[in-house]
Image: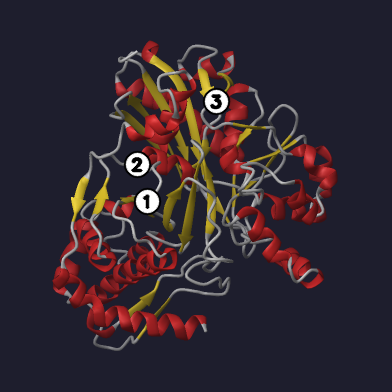
């Protein structure tokens, strides 16, 4: 068994990745392929199911071929993907329309109508799911489809999340897991869907479209003969049900222990604490994710993380945006500009869905404050990185985190200057776990647990913990950033008042 290998598939909103891991969590190969997010109308966010399926076949097939491993050593496949949204299929798994992603906001007017009829609507959602209402969740999106695309719903047999759509195509089996079912919105306490929430959105007659719920670390079937032939893998290779990307990242980072804070500095900026019970405080703010292993992850989300840096490169530095040396040039700009960016502040609220922490404000948008002719490009870049770091401090404050173990994952965690900035602001040691594809690794660990390589998913996650680089807070760095943090908070409060 020690020589067995596991594939983890991680389908993000714009990047699909597959990686191969051994039982020690070591990554032996990786393949990636970009997918295009389509925005045909204001607030819409969709993916082409055919493109996503082709990307899945491509990355799994390539990682097997290019890693050089013996394919007969691969014991199972696990999946994770961007959560919620809606992927509508017929009985055979063929998509009937583009997939709707988590960041879609077409259901906003519908939610406003619900609130107008029932002022306690948002409170009911939070008290059941532990999360503020997000427009891209499955139930509001399904309610929108029922109202606006009844011809599609009339032909539908299944409404799935992204990972569940892909797994349906891989195995021919329909299922979802508790991480998805409890956040659509569902019931965090019961760790599954909620008939009360289904009724709240007027979807009683369409509940049968939602798939059966199983454990993330259980098997959902095996590869069909057709798919296995395309991938160069054996027919019937076990495929685990898998988990949403948040849960998979926590697992893959080694963070599935109560009291551990896992922060994600990726496209989305998130900070959360793992608990052994569902936590609903602070009320009416943030998100509560159900995790495998009888754990919950209480999280605060800024929504936009490294998206801010991507925007800065494309808008402020198109001459270096696509160059491999862009991060070395970024470090030069940081060294050339003092903390505080010479009085320039940046609010990193770049998502079209606004923010849900430290306050809920769908209208919040990113902006610079204090901009003057003396600010050059280096100042703008420093302000962007500081703004994201200050927003992460906001999230830690909202959670009242008093623990000592902090993990930081995501693409932004690969920049030591950015990590040290966050470490100084939080005032806690921060561990950047070894590796990079934590979502894929979490999916692979779920697959390994599903076929009996680990007794529990908690044991599997613990097996990859404690192997990262430790950053320690620098008091001088915190003092240097203090005036800029104050200016940021003033700008934030003016915007969110």
Above or below 103: residue 486: below
- Quadrant housing residue 313: bottom left
Contact between labelled residues 1 and 2, with CB atoms less than 8 Å apart = yes
Which residue is the site of mark 1? 262
Q: Earlier in the sequence, mark 3 or mark 1?
A: 3
Which residue is the site of mark 3? 218
- Quadrant housing residue 89: top right
Local SS, label 2: loop
Q: Earlier in the sequence, mark 2 or mark 1?
A: 2
The 10 Å Cα crowd at callout 3, few under 14, some 14 to 19, many 20 or more, is many
Estimate the spatial distance between the alpha carbons at disc 2 and disc 1, rounded to whole Å: 8 Å
Q: Is residue 477 left or right of residue 55?
A: left
Measured as percent of width and height from the top left, residue 474 is found at 16, 66
Residue 59 in sight in this render: no
Local SS, label 3: loop
Measured as percent of width and height from the top left, residue 126 is found at 63, 60
User: Which label number is shown at residue 253?
Assistant: 2
Q: Is residue 116 left or right of residue 10?
A: right
Q: Nearer the viewer, residue 193 or 415?
A: 193
């Amino acid at each position: 068994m020690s020589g067995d290998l596991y594939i983890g598939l991680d389908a993000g909103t714009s990047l699909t990745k597959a990686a191969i891991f051994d039982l020690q969590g070591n990554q032996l190969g990786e393949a990636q392929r970009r997918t295009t997010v389509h925005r045909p109308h204001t607030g819409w966010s969709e993916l082409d199911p055919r493109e996503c399926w082709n990307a899945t076949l491509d990355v799994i097939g390539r990682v097997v071929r290019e890693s050089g491993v013996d394919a007969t050593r691969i014991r199972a496949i696990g999946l994770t993907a961007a959560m919620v949204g809606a992927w509508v299929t017929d009985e055979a798994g063929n998509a009937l329309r583009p997939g709707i992603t988590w960041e879609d906001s077409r259901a906003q007017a519908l939610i406003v109508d619900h609130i107008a009829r029932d002022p306690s609507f948002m409170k009911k959602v939070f008290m059941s799911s532990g999360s503020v209402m997000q427009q891209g969740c499955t139930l509001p999106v399904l309610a929108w489809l029922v109202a606006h695309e009844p011809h599609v719903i009339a032909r539908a047999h299944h409404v799935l999340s992204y990972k569940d759509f892909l797994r349906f195509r891989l195995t021919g089996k329909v299922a979802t897991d508790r991480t998805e079912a409890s956040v659509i919105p569902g019931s965090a306490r019961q760790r599954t869907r909620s008939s009360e929430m289904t009724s709240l959105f007027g979807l009683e007659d369409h509940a049968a479209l939602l798939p059966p719920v199983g454990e993330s670390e259980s098997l959902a079937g095996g590869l069909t003969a057709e798919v296995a032939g395309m991938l160069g893998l054996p027919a019937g290779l076990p495929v685990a049900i898998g988990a949403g990307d948040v849960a998979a990242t926590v697992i893959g980072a080694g963070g599935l222990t109560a009291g551990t804070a896992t922060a994600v500095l990726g496209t989305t900026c998130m900070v959360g604490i793992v608990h052994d019970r569902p936590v609903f405080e602070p009320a009416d703010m943030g998100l509560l994710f159900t995790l495998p292993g009888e754990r919950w992850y209480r999280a605060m989300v800024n929504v936009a993380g490294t998206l801010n840096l991507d925007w800065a490169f494309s808008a402020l530095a198109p001459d270096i945006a696509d160059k491999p040396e862009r991060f070395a040039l970024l470090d030069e700009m940081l060294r050339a500009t003092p903390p505080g960016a010479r009085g320039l502040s940046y609010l990193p609220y770049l998502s079209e869905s606004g923010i849900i922490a430290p306050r809920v404000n769908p209208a919040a948008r990113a902006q610079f404050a204090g901009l003057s002719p003396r600010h050059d490009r280096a100042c703008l870049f420093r302000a962007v990185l500081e703004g994201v770091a200050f927003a992460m401090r906001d999230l830690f404050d909202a959670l009242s985190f008093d623990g000592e173990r902090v993990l930081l994952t995501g693409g932004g965690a690969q920049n030591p200057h950015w990590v040290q900035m966050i470490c100084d602001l939080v005032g806690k040691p921060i561990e950047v776990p070894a590796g990079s594809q934590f979502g894929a690794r979490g999916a692979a660990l779920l697959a390994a647990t599903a076929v009996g390589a680990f007794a529990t998913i908690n044991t599997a996650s613990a097996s990859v913990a404690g192997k990262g680089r430790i950053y320690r807070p620098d008091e001088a760095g915190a003092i240097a950033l203090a005036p800029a943090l104050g200016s940021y908070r003033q700008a934030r409060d003016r915007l969110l008042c």
